[in-house]
Image (cartoon, rainbow, N blue to C red):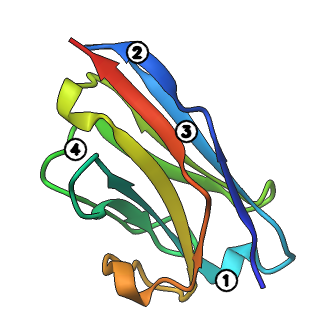
Amino acid sequence: QVQLVESGGGLVQAGGSLRLSCAASGRTFSSYAMGWFRQAPGKEREFVTATSSSGRTTSYADSVKGRFTISRDNRKNTVYLQMNSLKPEDTAVYYCAAKMSRVVVTTMNEYDYWGQGTQVTVSS
């Protein structure tokens, strides 16, 4: 069982930056691929980015490439999402997710564990 707790969300102006964190419980964090997803009001949850268990492989949605960076610290059981050049369309609840896998996982339905989400609001 893995418990995930996101933090770092908030209100930011367009062009600004935020860093989200996702802290995981358990001793096997380094065995889990991690992902970030988001859900805007009235829309389906969508993939943002993911990293392999080692952190050496990453994947990004086209909409965030060049602006967002995923990273992880397996010693701290934490995955991060650095978000730069934020746009109003990035406004959403951001969720982190975990799946026991060495390779990067981009499909939402494959993830086994989810955090409660953190709100990110970007004003224009």
Residue 6: mark? none
Residue visible at 52% across and 32% down? 19
Task: Give the mark, 1 or 2, whose residue is nearer the N terminus.
Answer: 2
The amino acid type of the residue labelled 3 equals Leu
Q: Nearer the viewer, mark 1 or mark 4?
A: 4
Mark 4 nearby-residue class (10 Å; few <14, some 14–19, many ≥20): some
The amino acid type of the residue labelled 2 equals Val
The image quadrant where one finds the C terminus is: top left
Are discs 3 and 1 less than 8 Å apart at CB?
A: no
> Which quarter of the figure has residue 27?
bottom right
Is residue 51 depicted above or below 82 in this figure? below
Q: Would you name the residue on which mark 1 appears? A: 31
Q: Would you name the residue on which mark 4 appears? A: 64
Q: Would you name the residue on which mark 2 appears? A: 12
Task: Give the mark, 3 or 1, whose residue is nearer the N terminus.
Answer: 3
The amino acid type of the residue labelled 4 equals Val
What percent of the width, then of the height, locates residue 62?
13, 53
